[in-house]
Image: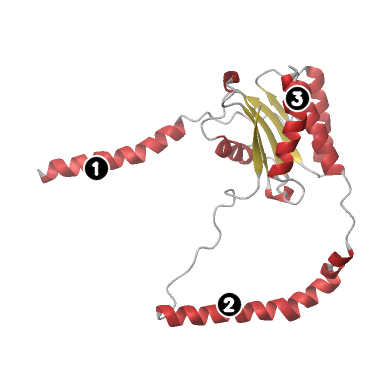
Amino acid sequence: MKRKMFISLFGVLAAFVWMPAYAQRNEPPIPEEPPPGIYILDTLDWLTSQQEAEINALIERLDQDGLTDMAVVTLNDCGTNKTNYRKSFLQAWSIGHVDDKDGLLILVCWYGGDKSRRSVEQEFGPGMNGILSSTITDRVAKENFVPAFQNDRPGDGLVAMVKNYDAILRSPKPAQSPSSVFFDSAFLFPFIFCGLLPMSILVLFARWIDKNSTNGGYSGGGDFGGDAGGGGDSGSSTSF
């Protein structure tokens, strides 16, 4: 009897382990990366040869100027979790300059034209924070791709998106305000060294003493690091 119960319990546990793995295996694979110098994979055949050449030239100049490494991809199926898929895509293709992590992916997910699922997915690396945000990427898609798609010109919409990013990335940075001058390097280092650093040490020391007095001693290490690719403002999903 005990043996049968053990076998049944083992079967239930195995099912819980197997089901997520099975679901993951059934997610669509990330396609092979195009050869160097090619920044487009248009499996939906939405782009004309002229549009592809225009997009490729724009992205190549951005790449050579060190502003971003970008890819434009159209797929029919991006799986059940498009957010995870686009994050995995960015990593799998190593989109972005290695030291800067400034990649940007424009990924159209079509799903056979299903209005409840199709979307423009965008993902950017942490090096683009401060330049791009989910609000900006969503706006770029809504203002450029969506109206072009509604006029049956999806290829023009993708070209317009890349042009918009080219303008954003090449626009001059806003002038420094007088209040921000305080945080220039000439002022910032003495401020941190003489003010914030001692204060931070005191606060941390006080917390350590309080923790020891509460728990009766140090109870082990904390959580350092974490999932670098999870959370945060790193992209957007725009239905069309």
Q: Which residue is mark 2?
A: 204
Mark 2 packing: few (<14 Cα in 10 Å), some, or many (20+)? few
Lower position in the chain sequence, tag 1 or tag 3: 1
Question: Which secondary structure, mark 1?
Answer: helix
Q: Which residue is mark 1?
A: 10
Contact (Cβ within 8 Å) of mark 2 with mark 1: no
Residue located at (90% from left, 56% from top) = 175
Looking at the rendered image, the disc whose residue lies closer to the viewer, 3 or 2, is 3
Q: Which residue is mark 3?
A: 147
- Kindly report the distance in space between the C-alpha atoms of the residues bearing marks 3 and 2: 53 Å
Q: Position of residue 95 (x, y in %)?
A: 69, 40
Q: Is residue 82 above or below residue 112?
A: below
Lower position in the chain sequence, tag 2 or tag 1: 1
- Kindly report the distance in space between the C-alpha atoms of the residues bearing marks 1 and 3: 54 Å
Give the quarter of the figure containing the N terminus. Answer: top left
Question: Which secondary structure, mark 2?
Answer: helix
Q: Position of residue 142 (x, y in %)?
A: 73, 32
Question: Which secondary structure, mark 3?
Answer: helix
Looking at the rendered image, the disc whose residue lies closer to the viewer, 2 or 1, is 2
